[in-house]
Structures are given as C-alpha cells and as structure tokens.
Amino acid sequence: MFMRSAFILPLLATVVHGAGMFGFLNKGSHEATHADDVQATIAEESIGTERQEQQESLVGIYIIKSSGKPNLCIDDMDSHTPGEGNFHLWECNEYNINQHLTYDAASQQLRNPHKNLCVDDGGAFEPGQALLTYWHCDPGNINQRFEFNSAENMFYNPHKNLCLDDGGGFYPGDSKFHMWECSGNTNQRFEMERL
C-alpha cells in the first residue's frame, strides 16, 4: 500500500501542476488564454476610443454633400412641421438652413438645429417604401437611426439593413431621398462638411 501511495502522489502532483486541475488546462494554455483576454480587452478599448473620437469629431453643424454629384446637398425642401415635405438634392449653400444638420453619433440621429426636428425614414422596412421626412426627435425611434460609416461615406440603418439613398437624381430637385438596399453606389455616398 505504501508503495502505491509513493508512486501515485508524485504522479498526481505532476498532473495537477503540469496540466492544471483535473488535467483540463496546462500552464501554457492558461497563459495563452490570459493573453487572449488581455488582447480582447485592448481591442474593445480601442474600438470604444475610436467610437468616442468619431463622436467628438462629428460635433457641429454640417451640410451633407453627395460624393459623386458635384455641388448637390441634402435639402429639406423648406419643411418646418413633422411629416411635411421630403428631402431632395439641391445646390449646396452653407447659409441655407434647409441644409443644416447635426449628427449625434451616440443616438445616430440627424437633426436640424434650427427646426429642432430629426430626419426620419418614414417607417420604411423595404427599399423605396417611404420617403425621408422630418419628425419629432426620439432617440428610441428606429426610423431615425442613421449610422455613419466614415470609411464608406454611407448612412446605414442597422435595424433595417437599408442605406440612405438620394433616389438617383443628378440635378437639383430631380429625385427624393428614401432608404434602399446598401450597394455603395453614387446615390448612397455622402460627405459631411462642417460649417
């Protein structure tokens, strides 16, 4: 009996120390797991910092230009009441309050600071189903969510999997804004120019 114990105890100590309790982990994999956790935390902090920097960098009043259509901007057609009017492309004019918008990266809302109304997709869940309009600002309203992807210069509604689209016009007043399948075409690319 003593001989078995003398043999089993050193073997058990080797198993517990070398492979971890019950043999599920060894010391090397535990250190690798810890290193992976540290890297994941650093990545999460980096993403959080990047989002915060993007939020801080988007503070201010903007006009939003069509990337592929020279001197055309998002314009609210002089709307002042929720549900009144729609958005179209119009000649860019930094003094035209119908083109002034702020972007809140946290709530993902576009708001006209002079009219205190937010851009709303009209409740569309299908491409082209409704035209953009103004509505009372409500951070909980998914119709007012426009996540801006600065790398692609696109506004995307993450709840509907649709992108802001200018309707295809190439001249002032030629077409009206709606939500459409995200394709990255010229109708969906915009540049935010701070005033």
Image: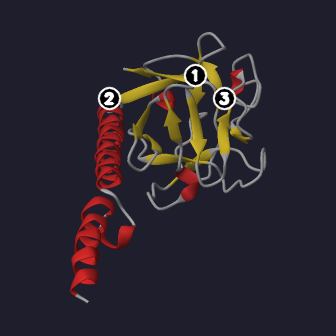
Assign a secondary structure to mark 1. Answer: strand
User: What crowding class fits label 2: few (fewer than 14 Cα within 10 Å), some (14-19), or many (20 or more)?
Assistant: few
Query: Where the N terminus falls, by quadrant?
Result: bottom left
Task: Say if mark 1 contacts mark 2, CB within 8 Å.
Answer: no
Q: Is residue 1 above or below residue 105?
A: below
Q: Is residue 128 above or below residue 142?
A: above
Q: Earlier in the sequence, mark 1 or mark 2?
A: 2
The x and y percentages for residue 123 are 67, 57
Tell me which amino acid carries mark 2. Ser
Residue 166 visible? The answer is yes
Assign a secondary structure to mark 3. Answer: helix
Task: Say if mark 2 contacts mark 3, CB within 8 Å.
Answer: no
Residue 82 visible? The answer is no
Q: How is the image coloured?
A: secondary structure
Q: Which mark is residue 166?
A: none
* Residue occupying image coordinates x 70% and y 37%: 182
The residue at which mark 1 appears reads as 73
State the residue in front, 114 or 145: 145
Q: Earlier in the sequence, mark 2 or mark 3?
A: 2
* Residue occupying image coordinates x 29% and y 38%: 49
Foreground mark, 1 or 3?
Answer: 3
* Residue occupying image coordinates x 36% and y 33%: 54
The residue at which mark 3 appears reads as 188
Q: Earlier in the sequence, mark 1 or mark 3?
A: 1
Assign a secondary structure to mark 2. Answer: helix
Q: CA distance from mark 1 to mark 3?
A: 12 Å
Query: Where the C terminus falls, by quadrant?
Result: top left
The residue at which mark 2 appears reads as 57
